[in-house]
Amino acid sequence: MQARIATNAAAHADRTARWAARGERAVPRLDVPSLRSVDPTVMDRLGPTAALLVVRPVVGVAGFVWMVASGWWLATPLLLWFLYGSTVSAMHHLIHGSVGFGPRTRHGLLTVLGFVILESGHAWQATHLLHHRDGSDLPDPEGFVENLGWRQLPLGALQWRFRIAAWGWRHSPRRRRTSVEIANVVALTVIAVALVPITWVPLAYVALMQLGTFLFAVLLAKGPQANFGRETTTPLMFVHTRLIGHLLFHHHLHVEHHAYPKVPMARLDRLRPTVEAALADDEVVRVRLAV
């Protein structure tokens, strides 16, 4: 036990030095017990929940169409949190293969759902899987916004989607599919602009998704999992909340997700005691939200 404590302390000191030198906040690879020894039931089939994950974005798009058809176009931004958040959540589960679908279905859904928010699903896959790798010499195109100050953040958040698309296209193992996805997004944007003399609705949707990506990047950089932008000496942050966790589609469980990336997000709270015990020798920050 003492040897393990000494090893963990040395590893933590090394990680802290890397983070201080590079301004990193990326969560490293965590030494946690195997799921089989903790709670193998968290990997039970999701059943109807898996279908719900991929159906919610469709409901969001239908809600947008219904609002526009009903003349409530000014209320469409109110739908953004559900539409964008549920789509990102579904894509995240597809990327990690935690929804129980076969590979072909997962890749097909990733393309379709990426198109819902006007992103390349496979560019996101390439950058997000890199985000989960532990290596001080590796870039983190997804998390670069976390290192920006408040003054640099607006421009960085605007650039986020383009950096993800560019890096993902260059490094995705499925470059042809990624190229098609990016081309489709560009084509829809051009068509939306061209249709403005006839109808503004497609352009309004494009603008809404651009806003969604901007706000998502801001949340990544300064949200609860980043301690609201405060200076910290460690990226190991546990966010304690009740209601807001549901509003964030359970993505506040960031450290827990890095410990067990293939576990569905809604089940990660069952593994929090295990993760906290495994990190008992590390420096952690606990962010407590009132609701």
Image (cartoon, helix red, strand yellow):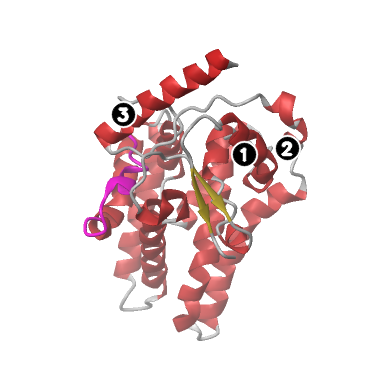
Which portion, as a residue range, is magenta?
138-152
Residue placed furthest toward the front: 2
Q: Residue at x 31, y 29 (%)?
A: 18
Residue at 55% across / 84% down in the picture? 70
Which of 270 and 126 lies nearest the eye of the viewer? 270
In the image, what residue type sits under mark 2? Val
Give x and y (percent) for residue 285. Answer: 47, 45
Question: Compared with residue 282, is residue 255 higher up or lower down, i.e. above or below?
Answer: below
- Residue highlighted by disc 1: 105
Q: Which amino acid does label 1 sit on?
A: Thr
Distance (Cα) linking label 2 and label 3: 33 Å
Q: Earlier in the sequence, mark 1 or mark 3?
A: 3
243 or 137: which is nearer to us? 243
Q: From mark 1 to mark 3, how far is it between C-alphas?
A: 39 Å
Q: Which secondary structure lies at badge 3?
A: helix
Nearest-to-viewer mark from 2 and 3: 3
Q: Mark 2 points at which residue?
A: 42
Q: Nearer the viewer, mark 1 or mark 2?
A: 2
Label 3 sits on residue: 18
Q: Where is residue 181 in the image (x, y as percent from the top left)?
A: 41, 45
Q: Residues within 10 Å of mark 2 (few under 14, many from 20)?
A: some
